[in-house]
Amino acid sequence: MRAFTFFGPMEPTARAREVHRALATEPLAVVFVFGAPALIRAEGLAQALQQAFGDVPVVGCSTAGEVAPSGYVADSLTVVGLSAENFVASVVRLDAVDQATFADAQHAARLAEDGLRRQGQPLSNDRSFAVLLTDGVSLVEERLAMWLQRALGEVPLVGGSAGDALSFKSTHVLADGRLWASAALLVCVRSQVPFRIIRTQHFRPTERKLVVTAARPRERLLLELDGLPAAQAFAQAIDVPVERLTPAVFARHALLLRMGGEYFARAIRRLEPNDALSTYCAIEEGLVLTLGTGEQLVEGLEAALDEASRDIGPLAGVLTFDCILRRLEVEANDLGAPLGVVCRRFNLVGFSTYGEQTGAVHVNQTFTGVALGRRS
């Protein structure tokens, strides 16, 4: 797993050649490109990257920040290549994801499996994983992740929702030499090295409960909590004035939903007119949410990565999908330096997302990823 980070604009063909020179020191199975919107959207870059790598699929997305082995970075193209010696990959694009059906997800999974089989490496429950990169403003990640995981069976699914540097207007995935809106990529990978799927969050539940008494689920809008305007109820719960509800505040206080004995974060995106709150995940009337309080973000991540390395041996790297709210919390609490130590130690590469996928579940304020071991 080789990773590099490139900063600043450059003529697209020259940038593609630069990326190719850095990565193509060995045959590759797939190249991931995670980029700041202004860089990844440069006219002609997607096509130039695919032409530079020939038959090797180049996939990726726009971000809300990038994760590099040095730590959190911004305004970059962060790229990673998986070697053909250790991996085989098959990529399928789903268009118009807001109109997708379960049949579409089944078809995509079959196509991805066929792509691996044609390369002599069929999908395997214990030797394969799937990566989902999807439009981050489509508002359909919940059902897309659920449908794809159901179609994939026991093959684990992990991934992230593309970002646009906190503009929340337009996000893109990269595939087939161009950028795509309202689309998703399913990347199925057969691995010759051990791997583990990681999911970790740093919130513990408190005793404070909040009931969703009014919502607009399709728009991910919280209108009322406990019969009060949502922002007012939330502000009271955390003892902060409504006018001080900012993304940095939301990053410190998660709403947790209990499912199957576990708590999953339902993060707040921003304060909306009329004291409504928009969220990064689907929200429905009648849900009972638990206020969560954050603790030891960096230490929790390091513990999860240490556990993975004890399980599968020293890590070659971690393909990383990390919630933008975690980045905001790190920045607000000056945790960049200790986080950088963890990123360097475990070779983390990926991006800050508008949501994370783990199995059939779409989550927030969570770190998900694929920890890749070394070939014995």
Image: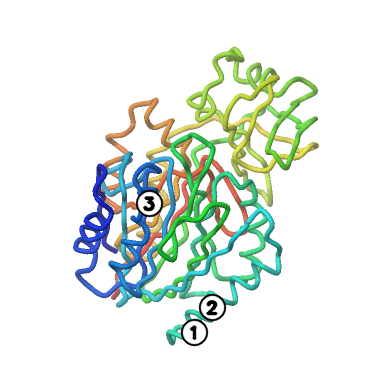
Give how far apart the Cα atoms at labels 3 and 2 are: 24 Å
- Are dots 2 and 1 in contact, CB under 8 Å? yes
> Residue 2 or 181: which is nearer the viewer?
181
What kind of residue is marked 1? Arg
Q: Secondary structure at mark 2?
A: helix
Distance of label 2 from label 1 (alpha carbons): 6 Å
Callout 3 amino acid? Phe
Q: Nearer the viewer, mark 3 or mark 2?
A: 3
Identify which residue is drawn at 65% across, 50% down.
140
Residue 196 location in percent, x, y? 44, 63
Above or below residue 231? Residue 9 is below
Residue under pointer 2: 113
| Coordinates of residue 11 in the picture (x, y in percent) | 25, 50
Residue 125: x and y in percent read 53, 75
Q: Secondary structure at mark 1?
A: helix
Q: What amino acid is at disc 2?
A: Glu
Q: Name the disc covering residue 117, or none.
A: 1
Using the rendered view, name the quadrant where residue 25 is placed. Answer: bottom left
Where residue 115 sits: x, y (%)? Answer: 49, 79
Q: Residue at x 50, y 51 (%)?
A: 160
Residue occupying the point 27% across, 49% down: 69
Upstream in sequence: badge 3 or badge 1: 3
Q: Residue at x 40, y 74 (%)?
A: 191
Q: Residues within 10 Å of mark 2 (few under 14, many from 20)?
A: many
Q: Secondary structure at mark 3?
A: strand
Residue 113 vertical placement versus 368 (above, below): below
Q: Say how many tags the image has.
A: 3
For label 3, the residue is 34
The residue carrying pointer 1 sits among few (fewer than 14), some (14 to 19) or many (20 or more) residues within 10 Å by Cα, namely: some
* Dot 3 crowding, Cα within 10 Å, few <14, some 14–19, many 20+: many
Image quadrant for the N terminus?
bottom left
Quadrant location of the C terminus?
A: bottom left
